[in-house]
Image (tube, rainbow, N blue to C red):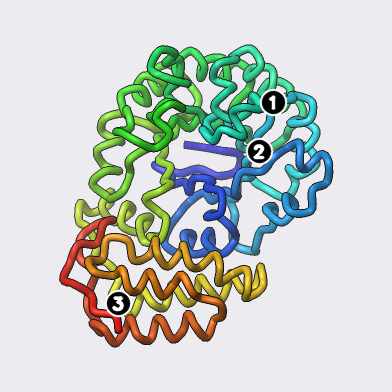
Amino acid sequence: MRLGAYSWEHPLFLAPMAGVTDAAFRQLCKEQGCDVLCTEMVSAKALYYKNKNTRELLVREPGEAPLAVQLFGSDPEIMAEMAVQIQDDYEIIDVNMGCPVPKVVNNGEGSALMKNPALAEQIISTMAKRLSKPLTVKIRKGFDENSVNAVEFARRLEAAGASAVTVHGRTRAQYYSGTADWEIIRQVKEALSIPVIGNGDIFSGEDAARILRKTSCDGLMMARGARGNPWLFAEIRSYLETGETPPRPTREELCAVILQHGEMLSAYKGERVAMREMRKQVAWYTTGIPHASRLRARCNTLSSLADLRQLMDDFRQAEPGRHLPGSGKWPGNPVKIR
């Protein structure tokens, strides 16, 4: 698979996730073998009106390449103009046509565009004519089960100038519930000549191997499976290359990455804001560890790096050196947190 100056056999992508895929988390995923990173979803209209908070979403760090910036919007001219303005700062421009959030959909943006293929095609055509960077699009299976149109929709995007299409195998109506339909990804792959990236229900190396066999897609995009689990990329890479799942990180390694995450966030956003965000991050990092409710309760009061360091010290002492077995859900013996 090739995008611009980059080529891979089966690249691993980090999906854009609001409140998750900032520069700190992206660097952790890069360290674990993620091939293509992506910013959080950015409103083209907010950029157009020079919204200060939106500009903060565009921050990148050295070594993040290739990095995609994901824009959303419904005005072809604004989408194209903003993409041209920022394209020199990124390797890939991605367009969101799959976000299910009501405030986005109600504006005719995100997955609402799957109900308006003509407008979606116009957006991509207008952007593609002005951009010199690869232009990719993220879509869903359809808006609901009565309007499953991913194949025809993707065909129109390819004709309009898209360089690649990512397909999330759920409808907008499903949000993130139920099971992702990998069959629709296979159908899109068979219908297009540009690369197709599969997305949905990839939580382990075995999942990655199964979706590749099922769909023959060119690349894989990980979203919820990577939250609190940047090691997912290393696990997938190992499984695809050797057929074996590597050991989960030790308790010491887990604590070290959580602290690294907190320190990087503090450097970017200030300690106070960073620790509020680390409350949810620590909860994700420890999801699935039985009887860790007291740990998560304590993380809800984090207000400083000192608090985070103390919490991790207590976590280390609970079961020092023990591996977290399993993949994704981390089942294991009860963890005692005092």
* Residue 150, placed above or below residue 321: above
Q: Find residue 116 and report its image quarter.
A: top right
Task: Read off the residue under disc 2.
Answer: 71
Residue 326 at x, y percent in the picture = 20, 60
Amino acid type at mark 3: Arg
- Could you tell which of marks 1 and 3 lies nearer the N-terminus? 1
Q: Nearer the viewer, residue 165 or 25?
A: 25
Task: Read off the residue under disc 3.
Answer: 251
Q: Would you say 223 lies left or right of 41 here?
A: left
Task: Read off the residue under disc 1.
Answer: 74
Q: Name the residue: 71% across, 56% down.
A: 56
Q: Find residue 226 and report its image quarter.
A: bottom left
Q: Name the residue: 61% across, 34% down.
A: 103
Q: Would you say 161 lies left or right of 82 here?
A: left
Q: Is residue 9 visible?
A: no
* Residue 101, placed above or below residue 316: above
Task: Give the quarter of the figure containing the C terminus.
Answer: bottom left
Q: Label 1 neighbourhood size at 10 Å, few (<14), some (14-19), many (20+)? A: many
Q: Residue furthest right?
A: 49
Q: CA distance from mark 1 to mark 3?
A: 46 Å
Residue 97 at x, y percent in the picture = 57, 29
Amino acid type at mark 1: Ser
Q: Name the residue: 78% across, 43% down.
A: 47
Q: Label 2 neighbourhood size at 10 Å, few (<14), some (14-19), many (20+)? A: many
